[in-house]
Image (tube, rainbow, N blue to C red):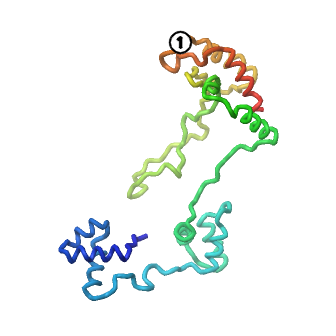
């Protein structure tokens, strides 16, 4: 869309030209195209008004029925501009998806968003979370510093970028190298733990293994968690410092966190 200049601004530009400034200098000062300044000056010298002529600009090509259909699509799922364009063509209204996009953004002032994703919770899980928050409503920073957070996550070793985000500017697609994709990429399953003070060592779960209760207790808790809790250093790297001041705080807080995960 072209930048629209107020009528007062146009008169100021004419005044600057009358005082001897060049059209180029006026255009630079106003941040306008020099052709716009020339057009204002030509209108002034011919005795014409500096106001925009009626009926100027791009004509509205969207029928009233199409506007109603587009307006009703706002806040509804799976209503892309291309689908709306096809729906309107079925009704006998020929309109491009770009015209639909312009009407949504310029007239309705709507934007395209992706729906947020959140986990589905049962009533029991919701009640547990509310109870957890109420019990710790007045916790201080020192209280939270006694908590250990642990989690596990898989990582794809040969991750293919999302095509929507992996954009390359070029004159044509013949010069672009293709992105190689592995059909079944290898994954690295990692467990880790952190506190306010430090980080634990990472435990890489062997390929093909499942983190069962027995595996978690024998491999992760015994071989990684307990040695990390026995650290004594209070200075140095976060990989060697002690995680918590003492073991008793960790055990009590760990037990308190378990009911939220059920």
Residue in the picture at 57% in, 25% down: 196
Image quadrant in which the N terminus is located: bottom left
Position above or below: 22 against 208: below
Between residues 239 and 179, which one lies in front from this camera angle? Answer: 239
Q: Which residue is mark 1?
A: 233
Disc 1, SS: loop
Residue 41 picture location, percent across and down:
26, 80
Q: Is residue 67 left or right of residue 3?
A: right
Image quadrant in which the C terminus is located: top right
The quadrant in which residue 249 appears is: top right
Residue in the picture at 30% in, 67% down: 30
Q: Is residue 91 left or right of residue 236?
A: right
Residue 122 picture location, percent across and down:
80, 42
- Mark 1: few/some/many CA within 10 Å (<14, 14-19, 20+): few
Q: Is residue 28 left or right of residue 77?
A: left
Residue in the picture at 67% in, 19% down: 250
């Amino acid at each position: 869309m072209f930048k629209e200049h107020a009528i007062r601004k146009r008169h100021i530009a004419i005044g600057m030209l009358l005082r001897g400034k060049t059209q180029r200098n006026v255009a630079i000062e106003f941040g306008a195209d020099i052709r716009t300044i020339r057009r204002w000056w030509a209108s002034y010298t011919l005795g014409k008004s500096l106001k925009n002529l009626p009926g100027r600009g791009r004509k509205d090509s969207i029928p009233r029925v199409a506007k109603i259909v587009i307006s009703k699509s706002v806040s509804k799922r799976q209503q892309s501009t291309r689908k709306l364009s096809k729906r309107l063509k079925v009704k006998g209204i020929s309109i491009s998806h770009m015209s639909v996009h312009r009407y949504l953004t310029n007239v309705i002032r709507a934007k395209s968003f992706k729906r947020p994703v959140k986990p589905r919770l049962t009533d029991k899980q919701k009640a547990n979370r509310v109870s957890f928050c109420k019990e710790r409503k007045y916790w201080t920073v020192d209280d939270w510093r006694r908590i250990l957070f642990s989690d596990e996550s898989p990582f794809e070793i040969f991750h293919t970028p999302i095509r929507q985000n992996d954009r390359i500017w070029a004159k044509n697609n013949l010069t672009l190298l293709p992105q190689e994709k592995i059909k079944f990429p290898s994954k690295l399953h990692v467990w880790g733990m952190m506190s306010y003070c430090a980080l634990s060592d990472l435990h890489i779960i062997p390929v093909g293994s499942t983190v069962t209760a027995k595996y978690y207790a024998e491999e992760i808790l015994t071989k990684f968690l307990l040695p990390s809790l026995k650290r004594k250093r209070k200075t140095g790297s976060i990989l060697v410092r002690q995680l918590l001041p003492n073991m008793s705080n960790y055990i009590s807080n760990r037990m308190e966190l378990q009911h939220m995960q059920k």
